[in-house]
Structure formats: structure tokens, C-alpha cells
Amino acid sequence: MLYTIDTSFGDIEDKLVGDLGCGCGVLSIGAAMLGAGCCIGFDIDEDALAISLANMEEFEIENADFIQVDLTDANSTTKWQKKFDTIVMNPPFGTKRNKGMDMTFLKTALNLAKTSVYSLHKTSTREHIQRKAKEWNVKMEIVAELRFDLPASYKFHKQKSVDIEVDLMRFTFYDDKQAGASFSAR
């Protein structure tokens, strides 16, 4: 995923990259290894961030850092508005338990990015996200169609794992004026 983002669009190497909902830091560390100028991972989970830091040390990464923040609180991210060249993320999918969370993450990402946002979403939500992109006046393109084997992680999951279709989406701005705009929650 990160290799494609860098080789196809030039959005990793020497860029300031943000990783929203970074979890254990896989995308942050991967971006750092691909030559990001600096990568900053954001997550609300203190335990996940401790794992991120340990992983960063294990891979001897020096151009990454991690910050604990609630990405659903718009006030907590205003100081980073339009500071990142590129945002990468694998947000909560926004269906069932976390309804709408994917859109909250996407709005935050669009507020923080100057150039592009790359995000993974369930293919079944593609039309909804296309409508939102049009409403928000941002370009959306499907970079890759993927299949994930998602293990059961919530009590409501009835199967050991399920194979789901996922889109890697790229969002960009139509012009410089739009890149400076802020996206409000709707």
C-alpha cells in the first residue's frame, strides 16, 4: 500500500506524513522506512502507542513519532490543520459498532492534509463516500481493491473471521483555495 502511494503518486518520500488511528504504528513505520521526511502517528489508545514506540525502536526508526490524541475532538487537532503533506490511515470501518467513525476520521484527515489523504474503507461504503467527496468538493479515486481476512474482534462477531472487500482510496483537493478550507462535521 505505502509502496504504491510513493511510487505512483510521490506522496511519501521527503514528505511530512500523518497516520491517523496509527494503532501499533505499522503505516507510520512503513512510511518512515520509505523515506518520509517525518511521520507522526496519532492514536487515542495509550497501550497501542506504547507498542508503536517499541516497534519504532526495534526497527531503529528515527524519523517518526507518536502522539496520544482523540481524533474525534476537532479542537484537539486544530494545531495540525494543513500541516501534513500526506495522511495515511486505516480508520475504524464505520459500520455497526463504530457507525460513522470512518467519516469522522476522513473529515479530520482532510483538515490536516495539504496534498492528499489515503484511506482504507469497506467497498460496500464506496458510493456513500463518493457522495461525501463530491459534497466536500474533494477528488476521490480508487487506488486499489483489496480483500482482508478480518478476525473476530468484537462480541457481536459470529464467525472466527470474515473475508471483506476493501478499497484503498486517494483524496486530493481541486485547487489551492480548497486545500486551505476546513471541513466541518455534518
Image: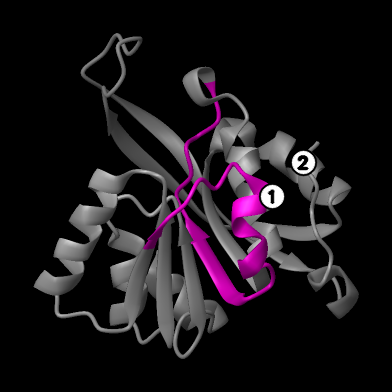
Q: Nearer the viewer, residue 125 or 46?
A: 46
- Residue to which mark 1 is pinned: 107
57 w.r.t. 102: above or below: below
Residue at the image position 48 percent from the left and 44 percent from the top: 91
User: Is residue 32 found left or right of 144 in the rendered image?
Assistant: left
Label 2 residue SS? loop
Relative depth, front residue between 160 and 16: 16
In the depicted structure, whether residue 5 falls above or below residue 36: above
Q: Say whether marks 2 and 1 touch (CB < 8 Å).
A: yes
| Residue type for callout 2 | Ala
- Classify residue 14 as left or right of residue 80: left
Residue 65 - label: none
**Viewer-proximal residue among 173 and 1:** 173
Q: CA distance from mark 2 to mark 1?
A: 7 Å
Q: Which is more N-terminal, label 1 or label 2?
A: 1
Q: What amino acid is at disc 1?
A: Lys
Percent position of residue 71, x then y = 55, 48
Residue at x 21% of width, y 64% of height:
53
Say whether residue 70 is magenta.
yes
Left or right: residue 94 versus residue 180 is: left
The percent position of residue 69, horizontal first and vertical second, equals 47, 51
Q: Does the segment drawn in magenta span residue 129? A: no
Label 1: state its secondary structure: helix
Residue 139 screen position, x and y as percent: 77, 61
- Which contiguous range is marked in magenta? 67-95
Residue 15, compared with residue 151, is above or below; it is below
Badge 2: residue crowd in 10 Å (few <14, some 14–19, many ≥20): few
Residue 103 picture quarter: top right
Give the number of the disc on residue 185: 2
Q: Residue at x 27, y 24 (%)?
A: 153
User: Which quadrant does the N terminus fall into?
Assistant: bottom left
